[in-house]
Image: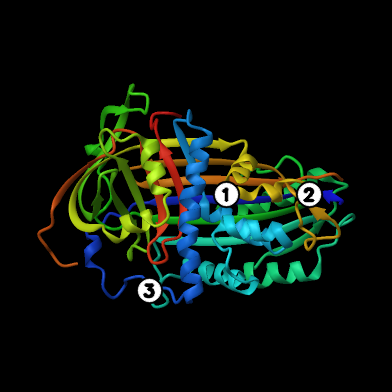
Amino acid sequence: MTTKIFLISVVVSFVLFSSCESNTPDNRTETDPKKTELTGEETVMVTDEKHFAVKFFETVYESDKNADNIVISPFGMNMALGVLRNGAEGETKRVMQEVMGMKDFTDSEINAYFKELSDYLMAPNPFFTDPSVELAIANSIWYNKDTYVIKPDFADLSKTWFDASITGLDYSSMEKAVKIVNQWCEDHTNGLIKGMLEDLTDIEILNALYFKGNWSAGCEFDVSKTTKQDFTKEDGSRIPVDLMHNELDLTYYEDDYLSMTNIPYGFIGAYKMYFVLPNEGVAFGDMVGQLAKPGYWEQCLANTRPGKVDIYIPKFKLEYKIGELKEVLVQMGMGIACDASTAEFPHIANTNYAIGRATQKTLIRVDEKGTESAAITEFGATGSTGADHEYPFHTFRADRTFLFVIQENSTGTILFMGKAGNPAEE
């Protein structure tokens, strides 16, 4: 079996800023985000994809328990795998779909799902354009035009279902070719991702995801209320952090393992950032293990209730790199796709492939104005060749290691997820 090298790169960036008007999340009626018209099969897939997201995070956490901070992009990962899946065959495709949470569905159902979901995420309300929120999704395929020819069927699937641009480059001038690809990354992340690649391999697949939005009106933090306070790390040590504070009308949930609340973005609250805190006496890892159980995250979301929340969230800027993302995929069950002797990717170009290299680099910053984040995930393949109400009052004090999630409200799609264990780290 002859195999060659290719890359899948997922570029993810979030830029979120605050509003200065007063409002509460319960006063939305005519501008409420629509409920997406996913088919029954797609509804099952989006539920399973949420489990993929939490399982992905759990696997990264278990493989890097000594890391204070972790940041990943589950949606960017699964979207890139969606493009790659169309090039797979046999057991490789079956295993990929199982890991992605789509094992019982046909090619057409899976491709339609990614298309429908992408279109919906970029326009959650057909009657109201929220100027304070922007989301853009882009895919591209790049290859050495002097060596490889992208197969027509793979090209058609990539263009039709993922709106991917496909470009052959002259690799004899590697510096120029790298500059072209890096410019695409920069252009599709509002300039946040610069100099992504230092060189190119024979075939690359890139996904760019860009999000920009304001905190919902009335949910911003007052800089004057930010104070220096202690934050307890997983090992019990304490560090000083800038702790933001506000009292907001939000939703709230708690059980024996955790408590959580969320802050919405934009005028219609189509996207939210969830903050999940293990209860006193519950280890962060035990909470993550509980969250990874099928259906548990959905249970938490379904049982959130309106409440007045006295919320304390630290300002933080976190950087994280998964240097062994290939091993994470293996641990999640995708080993067959990473082994040159077993992987089957015959449909991409005029040779076969296997995933051989994978990394992810991510940065996130949270302050009174909102959040700014950028992430790059790289896969390489190698082989042998409302109204006023009286609500319960809660205190949510994230002054110890916590989980954060950026999620679309209607489908529950998890765009971004991480662990904040050392908010003071620069």
First in sequence, mark 2 or 3: give its number. 3
Q: State if disc 3 and disc 2 touch (CB < 8 Å).
A: no
Judging from the image, the colouring scheme is: rainbow
Q: Is residue 188 visible?
A: no
What is the x, y in percent for residue 402?
Answer: 35, 39
User: Under tag 1, what secondary structure?
Assistant: loop
Are there few (<14), some (14-19), or many (20+) residues within 10 Å of tag 2? many
**Does residue 265 sit above or below 339 in this rendering?**
below
Residue with the most extreme top position: 237
Kind of residue at disc 2? Ala
Mark on residue 34?
3
* Marks 2,1: beta carbons within 8 A: no
Q: Give coordinates of residue 2: x percent, y percent.
A: 87, 51
Q: Which badge, 1 or 3, comes first in the chain's sequence?
A: 3
70 in relation to 406, above or below: above
Instruction: Identify the disc placed on residue 191.
Output: 1
**Where does label 2 land, which residue?**
177
* Rendering coords of residue 123 (x, y %): 46, 70
At 58% from the left and 58% from the top, the residue drawn is: 98
**What is the crowding at mark 1: few (fewer than 14 residues within 10 Å), some, or many (at least 20)?**
few
Disc on res. 145: none
**Camera-side mark, 1 or 3:** 3
The correct choice, above or below, for 237 with respect to 318 in the image is above
Question: Callout 2: helix, strand or loop?
Answer: helix
In the visual, does 111 lie left or right of 414?
right
Q: Which corner quadrant of the image does residue 359 belong to?
A: top right
